[in-house]
Amino acid sequence: MALRGDSAFAPDWARTLVDPLAFAHEQRCLSYVWTFLGFTDDVEKDGDWFRASLATRSVFVQRFGTELKGFENVCAHRFYPLRTKDKGNGPIVCGFHHWRYDHDGSAIGIPKCQENFGTVSRALGARLNPIEIATCGTLVFGRFPASGKRCSLADFLGPGFPILATLSRSPHKPLALSHELAANWKLGLQITFDDYHTVAVHPTTFGKTGYLDREKLTYARFGAHSALINSDRPQVFEELSAACADGSFRPTCYCILQILPNFLVALFRSDRDIFQCCIQQFVPVAHNRSLLRAWVYPAPFPVEGPWHARLWRHASDLVRNRLVQHYSRRVIREDNTICESVQAVAHQIERPPYLAALEERIGWFEQSYRQLVAEGQDVLANIPERTDGRPAAGNVLT
Ligand code: FES
Ligand SMILES: [Fe+2]
């Protein structure tokens, strides 16, 4: 059953792939959506921080005691980036003129403040733009603040929350991969929703067994997000969520959860009853460029069985993990090549695609994406005009 994607796709859906202004507007709108930024492991100790990208804007997350705080990575003085490395530890002190900020992002130590600004540091009222931070398991998410009632991260993820929380708890340091992709972030993401391309694109890995049988797969949609589970039990997604919530979940089949706007977690079998996790994020960089960040690690479940089976498992993990890394890199490379080729002709796309039954979730993604962009547009429309020429705190996108 082939479907035209007309109902999900706008006729000009590819504009953001070729038009920098359309891309910038899309990213402004999506900056208000909960977006994966990094891992709690990187901000374990007081003062730890990491830098990330939130809808193309540089931000950083920092631990202050028991709290995680996030700020746009731009000094209030003359806009120098406060964090110029990927991660570190220490107070917020700008490298340009040494302005120092506290845990609320207020400038509390401005060198020669009285002489230069005619007042004391606190009275100047300069502060960093804050971002909202929330966690799910070891995953740190952020978004720019906006007025009005907004959903919590738990509400945004819905039944996906306990699944992500469970799968993110890796006992081992994940293997981190990153690839620059000469293609729009949505092309990178679309191929992860596509269960139709494996025979043509991955002939030596997934494609060996032929086309997937749609009847034997469950596609579940929850809020803006979706999942594929390699099982035909009708309630399998709800069962998965409940089992993760009560701690009884043990993997038995392949599944993948795609969380809008640009994040996914997959659970896959690497050997008989042994599973691995793969987290991926397509970070938008420009209309025609993105950064794929990926982490691969053994699924966080206890090894069951007699002692010799557990011992063998630990010994064989070394070899298995290497093979998983090798195949993960290959699959990512094969997908990226396809995305970059589509990007090269993106200016010729003038209509929605045909969507196969095995591509149904691409249509779901596009619908949810349009909804989130529309909600962001509403936020932008409701930001009051300022009269003093300075951005309102938290409303930096005006
Ligand atoms: S730009 Fe940061 S202190 Fe001047
Ligand atoms: Fe693929």
Image: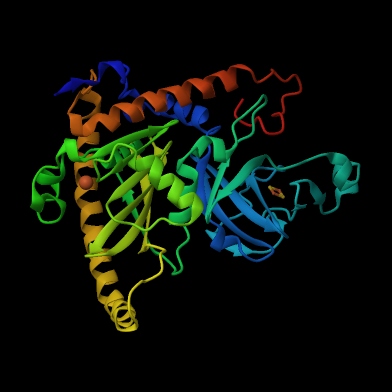
Q: How is the image coloured?
A: rainbow
Q: Where is residue 394 in the image (x, y as percent from the top left)?
A: 67, 33
Q: Where is residue 259 in the image (x, y as percent from the top left)?
A: 42, 40
Give left or right: position of 228 versus 344: right
Give left or right: position of 247 versus 77: left
Q: Can residue 18 be seen in this view?
A: no
Q: Where is residue 67 in the image (x, y as percent from the top left)?
A: 70, 54
Give left or right: position of 298 versus 322: right
Q: Considering depth in this image, is 248 or 115 the residue closer to the camera?
A: 248
Q: Locate the N terminus by quadrant.
A: top left
Residue at image point 36% right, 41% down: 237
Q: Considering depth in this image, is 389 or 195 the residue closer to the camera?
A: 195
Residue at image point 61% right, 58% down: 49
Answer with the quarter of the image where residue 132 lies: top right
As drawn, 300 above or below 165: below
Q: Locate the C terminus by quadrant.
A: top right
Residue at image point 29% right, 32% down: 361
As drawn, 359 above or below 206: above
Q: Where is residue 101 in the image (x, y as percent from the top left)?
A: 76, 51
Q: Is residue 189 visible?
A: yes
Counting every numbered tag in the picture gives: 0
Give left or right: position of 231 versus 186: left
